[in-house]
């Protein structure tokens, strides 16, 4: 008989790498379905930096933390393997917040059918959180204008790579900040960014001066880190800063001090943070915005696939080391 394997969060991280002690792997029987329920077998699970926030004890955030003892939260794609639900049949391909588990029984709330004729990896890399976040953050908050200069941090990541390509399609001068030469080459030579800056290299300010000779109009922040202050100092009047993520701070007990507010007033900057759960009701409209760019061949992606449920635990550390090359996904 098939059993469910799940990974529960049992301790909260206190800084440093994520390790197996924070989790327990459990095997459970799969209960019989009641009327109106379906059984889903998950095939691909998304790993996201947001998980660090979900594991923290902070209740004053945009979404409650995962309770200790609960299945770790994640989104994924799977298939219906049993159904007592009028709207789902066996074989339907579905997507939703599935958690770190192989199987689960649900009443279907929050579970949507996937009809796009694309592999799971492409759906999770483009049409799920990365693409939706890039679309909302860049197009709707950043409001890019042709001829402007944008800088994107975490530029080879799943969100940043789409932000940069959307900005390029809109006619901006696009600078990406990355942590390796391999990623720098990829975003310039494969994705069409105008320039890349490796934040681990020397002379960051000189590189900014060279690639953003006319200053920076739009700053899409995914990471934080020391380059943040240098970018901030080069913002143009009426520049916009879209704060999407600050991964450099996710494993710190105390967040880094931000840039000085003096530039906010002197350059009349607009700074806007956002989180996607506020926009989940707008997903159809966001997909309508994003799809034409994809159909026009303007959005490339790469996927980094790990194998097996338990690979999720160590996999999270790839976000900190920069070891992930593209959208991080666990194949079950
Ligand atoms: N606001 C929202 O609703 C929302 C939604 C999705 C994602 N996000 C945020 O967007 C950001 C990117 O997410 P993603 O899923 O696309 O992840 P990702 O960029 O694919 O992976 C994270 C990358 O961050 C870089 N990084 C790690 N530590 C760093 C440091 N100290 N300084 C600079 N860069 C560092 C690494 O790349 P390098 O090799 O280049 O260092 C790593 O590969 C995250 O901060 C995430 O929390 C926000």
Image (tube, helix red, strand yellow):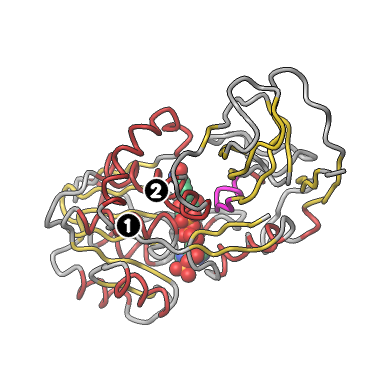
Quarter of image, res 29? top right
Residue position for label 2: 131
Check the image and name the residue furthest to the front: 90
Answer few, some or many: residues within 10 Å of disc 2's Cα (few below 14, many 20 plus, some between 14 and 19).
many
Q: Is residue 33 magenta?
A: no
Against 245, residue 209 (above or below) is: below
Q: Position of residue 194 (x, y in %)?
A: 23, 70
> Is residue 246 at least partly visible in the picture?
no
Q: For the residues carrying marks 1 and 2, which lies nearer the camera in this image?
A: 1
Q: Specify few, some or many for label 1: CA neighbours under 10 Å numbering under 14, 14-19, or 20 or more.
A: many
What is the magenta range?
46-53
Rounded to the nearest angstrom, the CA distance separating label 1 from label 2 is 9 Å
| 127 relative to 323, above or below | above
Taking the spot 30% from the left edge, 62% from the top edge, the residue there is 231
Name the quarter where the N terminus is drawn: top right
Q: Percent x, y for residue 216?
A: 21, 59
Residue 195 in view of the camera: yes
Q: Nearer the viewer, residue 73 or 117?
A: 117
> Circle 2 — which element?
helix
Whether label 1 lies within 8 Å of ligand 1 gets the answer: no
The residue drawn where x is 52% and y is 34% is 113
Q: Identify the element where label 1 is drawn.
A: loop
Q: Describe residue 275's horizontal placement relative to residue 86 as left or right.
A: left
Q: Residue at x 73, y 41 (%)?
A: 103
On the image, the x and y values in percent for residue 30 come to 83, 36
Residue that numbered label 1 is attached to: 299
Instruction: Report the quarter where the C terminus lies.
Output: bottom right
Up-down relation of residue 122 to residue 70 (above or below): below
Position in image of residue 271 (x %, y %):
31, 44
* Sequence-first tag of 1 and 2: 2
The reply to whether discs 1 and 2 touch (Cβ–Cβ < 8 Å) is yes
């Amino acid at each position: 008989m098939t059993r469910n394997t799940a990974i529960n969060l049992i301790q909260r991280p206190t800084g440093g790498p994520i390790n197996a002690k924070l989790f327990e792997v459990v095997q459970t029987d799969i209960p019989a379905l009641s009327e109106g329920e379906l059984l889903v077998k998950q095939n691909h699970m998304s790993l996201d930096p947001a998980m660090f926030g979900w594991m923290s004890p902070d209740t004053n955030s945009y979404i409650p933390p995962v309770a200790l003892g609960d299945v770790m939260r994640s989104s994924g794609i799977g298939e219906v393997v049993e159904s007592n639900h009028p709207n789902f049949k066996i074989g339907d391909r579905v997507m939703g917040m599935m958690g770190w588990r192989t199987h689960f029984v649900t009443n279907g709330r929050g579970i949507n059918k996937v009809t796009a004729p694309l592999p799971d990896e492409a759906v999770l890399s483009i049409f799920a959180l990365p693409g939706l976040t890039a679309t909302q953050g860049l197009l709707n908050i950043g409001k890019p204008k042709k001829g402007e200069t944008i800088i994107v941090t975490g530029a080879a990541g799943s969100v940043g790579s789409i932000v940069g390509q959307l900005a390029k399609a809109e006619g901006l001068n696009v600078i990406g900040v990355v942590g390796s030469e391999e990623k720098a080459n990829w975003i310039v030579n494969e994705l069409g960014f105008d320039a890349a800056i490796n934040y681990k290299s020397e002379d960051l300010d000189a590189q900014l001066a060279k690639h953003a000779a006319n200053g920076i109009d739009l700053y899409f922040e995914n990471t934080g880190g020391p380059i943040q202050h240098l970018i901030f100092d080069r913002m143009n009047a009426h520049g916009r800063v879209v704060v999407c993520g600050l991964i450099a701070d996710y494993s710190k007990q105390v967040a880094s001090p931000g840039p000085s507010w003096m530039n906010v007033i002197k350059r009349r900057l607009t700074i806007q943070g956002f989180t996607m759960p506020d926009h989940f009701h707008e997903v159809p409209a966001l997909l309508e915005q994003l799809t034409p760019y994809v159909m026009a061949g303007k959005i490339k992606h790469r996927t980094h696939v790990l194998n097996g449920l338990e690979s999720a635990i160590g996999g999270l550390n790839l976000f900190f080391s920069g070891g992930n090359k593209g959208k991080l996904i666990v194949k079950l």
